[in-house]
Image (cartoon, rainbow, N blue to C red):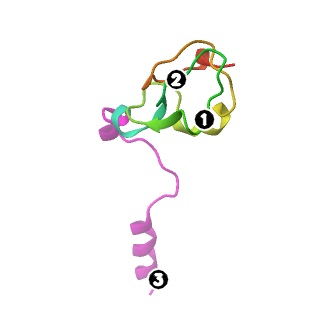
Amino acid sequence: MVSGIRDVQLALGSPHKKVVAAEKDTRIIQRRSIFTIKSIKKGEKFTKNNIECLRPFIGLPATDFSKILNKHAKRNLTPYTALSKSDFY
């Protein structure tokens, strides 16, 4: 029975996830970043209606989505522009 339990523990693996070497090359394609999905004018607020998390990962990470909501655009932005920290205040 103990041997069976140890086999199950090994099969479950670690709860801590790490990027392995095979994933490093495709990480940009797999992750999402925050993009505009509509034109946004300077001073306009970012809302769920004008930004979205899309692939590839070339801007701010998707995990920052809620932090950007209701912030204001520093410049005019065209649709499908990856956002960076310098794009809002």
The amino acid pointed to by label 3 is Val
N-term mark: 3 or 2? 3
* Helix, strand or loop status at disc 3: helix
Work out which quarter of the rendered image holds the N terminus and state it: bottom left
Q: Is residue 18 magenta?
A: yes
Q: Nearer the viewer, mark 2 or mark 1?
A: 2
Query: Viewer-proximal residue, 56 or 41?
Result: 41
User: Left or right: 85 with respect to 35?
Assistant: right
Which numbered circle lies on residue 30? none
Q: Residue 80: where, in percent of width, then height?
A: 42, 26
Q: Quadrant of residue 25?
A: top left
Q: Residue 44: where, in percent of width, then height?
A: 64, 22
Above or below, 33 relative to 84: below
The amino acid pointed to by label 2 is Leu
Above or below, 44 relative to 70: above
The residue at the point 46 percent across, 19 percent down is 78
> Can you identify the residue that label 1 sits on?
64
Q: Residue 26: where, in percent of width, then height?
A: 31, 35
Query: Viewer-proximal residue, 78 or 57?
Result: 78
Q: Is residue 25 magenta?
A: yes
Query: Viewer-proximal residue, 58 or 22?
Result: 58
Contact (CB < 8 A) between labels 3 and 2? Answer: no
Q: Nearer the viewer, mark 1 or mark 3?
A: 1
The residue at the point 55 percent across, 13 percent down is 76
> Can you identify the residue that label 2 sits on?
83
N-term mark: 2 or 1? 1
* Helix, strand or loop status at disc 2: loop
Above or below, 51 relative to 5: above
Read off the magenta span. Answer: 1-27
